[in-house]
Image (spheres, rainbow, N blue to C red):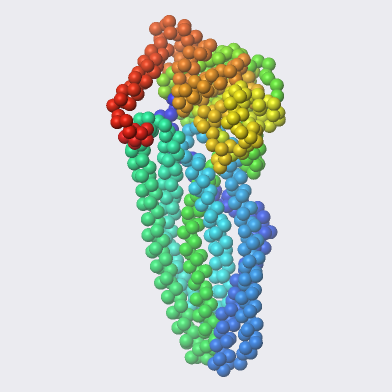
């Protein structure tokens, strides 16, 4: 049950323009400018040293054919070329790797910091998996090209320049012969660039769409099984995957054509060099050894030249991914703070200070709220929630329950009216101040990879072990000591002990306790749990949060029946307000909701028993879900 805005949900985050992505790339590459200059100088020297090898072989030919060259000089030239190019190339590669890894690390830090600083309302609006796709697929693509293709491009480019200089030194006509490949390469590159950028961008979009589909399916897996939507969801994922394959095949076709034209360029260039060399040799303007050197230089040149052009393929893919990453970074409200460690951003959001505000009430007057760029979806004339009251918000899907919770939390600005939560407007509070006054436990909770203590201290860094123990005892009782065998040092999260959904929600409730915030909002915090687990979580929440102001967006109406006050919403407005018993006695929407809920609860066990009697005794739960 989300707010009424869900029907018009946007699908993607913005994609940065080519100029903005290029400026970001240049900024990152110049973080260590002297290291970058040093690496280029070393790699240039390595490319120059590599020219000594074909030069030595050419002189060897002259020595064999009678031209006066010392074999010792030839041997020294070959050794210097091989050893010099290897040593200088290794040093240059290490220097370039240091510059590139710095750039890549900063890009990742900037992306994480920008993602953490995105307005919660925007994060809630984007399609499932969109941010995940950019944080994984796109960042990984940029990283692979940064550590692989970029060094190869630099080395190949410097080799092409050094070889051109070497051919010009031998004879300017050799350089002119080499340049005959330029029109062929230009044509091939022109044809390639006409289609490749569009195809790569479409491929990245298709990959993101597949990621969104898979993330949505995984998040809704219990619902998918319950309603028998497995085949339909599988077919949608298959369609998305085939779309990725289709775009990938189209890019491979373009690559193959590009490679064929490169081979044609090699044939044209080598033939030109040999023809010019033959003419120079017969005219006495060049020795056979010099012609051999020119041919070997061009042959050695073709490898870097082909690599340079073929790497356009990887650079196009990386450019498309970088534009998607830059699209998130450009949304950050303050560029100056992008390089702060992610842990600092997380601490700023979750840190809570000891002590309670003097007036932990919540009050809304004349409030009109809307999501950015949308019509108004919430209208609250007057609502006051006294300190310590337990309030449940109920209503059909799209009634505006979650929207009201976001307004109380300060995650959604209001267009009109006044919001006062614990003495201040939550939308204007600093993150630390907001966390000190009001916290939210939502339906989606996360267990971070690390110790149990680390997961709890995210709520308040200076909490003592005694406070952490007390919070865990409040939400789970003594059983938590059996669940976490090593106590607060138990490793949990990905790669460690996996928690059940119920225990993960208990952990989220414990975090809320650790903050000491007097106002707690539970936004369908037990919606994904089974009935038994949901009751256990609701009981834990009541025990743990006793004495605090608790606003619950109720998924189960049993939460409303145990609340001190029930707010019934329809179409973004509060249509009923009273206790559970008072609303049942009136002829209103809440009575109808309760009747429907009670009927469903009494019918569900009966239907389950009937299905079990109708099924063969050997039928398993897995087979029932598959059917």
Above or below 451: residue 412 = above
What residue appears at the point 35 percent right and 30 percent down from the top-left corner? 227
Could you say where residue 474 lies in the image, as x and y percent from the top left? 61, 22
Task: Locate residue 448 relative to residue 615 in the image: left or right.
Answer: right
User: Farthest front residue?
Assistant: 617
Q: How many marks on residues?
A: 0
Q: Residue furthest bottom?
A: 66
Question: Which residue is at a point 64% across and 39% down the rendered structure image?
Answer: 343
Q: Is residue 133 visible?
A: yes
Q: Position of residue 594 (x, y in %)?
A: 41, 13
Whole-percent x and y of residue 580? 47, 10
In this view of the protein, which residue sits in the foreground, 140 or 268?
140
Q: Quadrant of residue 271?
A: bottom left
Choose between 280 and 551: the one closer to the eye: 551
In the picture, which quadrant includes the N terminus?
top left
Q: Residue 526 at x, y = what percent? A: 49, 25
**Residue 56 position by quadrant:** bottom right
Is residue 19 at all visible to an observer of this figure? no
Q: Quadrant of the C terminus?
A: top left
Residue at 42% of width from left, 44% of height from top?
Answer: 210
The answer to whether 278 appears left or right of 90 in the picture is: left
Q: Residue at x 61, y 76 (%)?
A: 82
Q: Is residue 96 above or below residue 510?
A: below
Judge from the rendering whether residue 564 lies leftward or rightward of residue 430; answer left or right: left
The residue lying toward the viewer, choosing from 264 and 124, is 124
The answer to which image quadrant residue 557 occupies is: top left
């Amino acid at each position: 049950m989300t707010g009424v805005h869900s029907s018009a949900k946007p699908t993607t985050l913005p994609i940065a323009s080519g100029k903005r992505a290029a400026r970001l790339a240049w900024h990152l590459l110049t973080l260590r400018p002297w290291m970058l200059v040093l690496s280029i100088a070393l790699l240039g020297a390595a490319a120059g040293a590599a020219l000594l090898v074909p030069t030595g072989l050419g002189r060897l030919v002259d020595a064999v054919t009678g031209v006066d060259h010392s074999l010792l000089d030839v041997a020294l030239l070959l050794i210097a070329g091989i050893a010099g190019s290897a040593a200088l190339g290794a040093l240059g590669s290490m220097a370039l790797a240091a510059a590139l890894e710095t750039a890549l690390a900063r890009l990742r830090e900037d992306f994480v910091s920008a993602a953490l600083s995105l307005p919660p309302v925007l994060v809630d609006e984007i399609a499932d998996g969109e941010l995940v796709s950019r944080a994984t697929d796109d960042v990984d693509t940029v990283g692979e090209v940064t550590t692989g293709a970029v060094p190869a491009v630099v080395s190949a480019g410097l080799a092409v320049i050094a070889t051109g200089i070497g051919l010009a030194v031998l004879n300017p006509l050799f350089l002119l012969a080499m340049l005959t490949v330029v029109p062929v390469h230009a044509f091939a590159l022109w044809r390639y660039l006409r289609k490749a950028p569009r195809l790569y961008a479409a491929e990245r979009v298709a990959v993101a769409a597949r990621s969104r589909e898979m993330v949505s399916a995984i998040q809704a897996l219990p619902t998918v099984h319950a309603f028998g939507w497995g085949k339909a969801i599988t077919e949608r994922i298959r369609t998305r995957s085939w779309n990725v394959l289709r775009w990938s095949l189209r890019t491979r076709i373009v690559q193959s054509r590009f490679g064929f034209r490169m081979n044609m360029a090699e044939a044209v260039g080598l033939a030109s060099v040999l023809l010019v060399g033959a003419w120079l040799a017969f005219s006495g303007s060049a020795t056979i050894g010099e012609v051999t050197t020119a041919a070997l230089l061009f042959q050695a040149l073709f490898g870097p030249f082909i690599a340079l052009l073929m790497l356009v393929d990887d650079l196009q893919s990386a450019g498309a991914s970088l534009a998607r990453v830059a699209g998130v970074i450009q949304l950050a409200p303050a560029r100056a703070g992008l390089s702060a460690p992610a842990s600092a951003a997380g601490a700023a959001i979750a840190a809570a200070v000891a002590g309670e505000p003097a007036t932990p009430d919540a009050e809304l007057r004349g409030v009109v709220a809307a999501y950015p760029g949308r019509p108004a979806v919430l209208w609250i004339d007057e609502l006051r929630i006294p300190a310590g009251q337990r309030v449940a918000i109920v209503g059909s899907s799209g009634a505006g329950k979650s929207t009201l919770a976001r307004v109380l939390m300060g995650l959604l600005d209001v267009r009109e009216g006044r919001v006062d939560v614990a003495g201040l407007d939550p939308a204007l509070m600093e993150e630390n101040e907001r966390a000190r006054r009001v916290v939210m436990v939502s339906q989606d909770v996360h267990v971070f990879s690390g110790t149990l203590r680390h997961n709890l201290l995210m709520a308040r860094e200076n909490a003592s072990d005694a406070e952490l123990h007390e919070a865990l005892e409040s939400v789970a009782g003594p059983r938590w000591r059996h669940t976490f065998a090593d106590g607060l040092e138990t490793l949990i999260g990905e790669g460690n002990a996996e928690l059940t959904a119920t225990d993960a929600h208990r952990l989220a409730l414990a975090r809320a306790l650790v903050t000491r915030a007097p106002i707690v909002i539970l936004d369908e915090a037990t919606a994904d749990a089974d009935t038994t687990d949901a009751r256990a979580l609701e009981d834990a929440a009541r025990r743990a949060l006793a004495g605090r102001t608790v606003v619950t967006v109720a998924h189960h109406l049993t939460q409303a029946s145990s609340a001190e006050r029930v707010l019934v919403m329809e179409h973004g407005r509060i249509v009923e307000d009273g206790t559970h018993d008072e609303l049942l006695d009136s002829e209103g929407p809440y009575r109808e909701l309760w009747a429907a809920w009670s009927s469903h609860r009494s019918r569900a066990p009966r239907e389950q028993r009937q299905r079990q009697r109708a099924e063969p005794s050997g039928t398993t739960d897995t087979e029932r879900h598959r059917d």
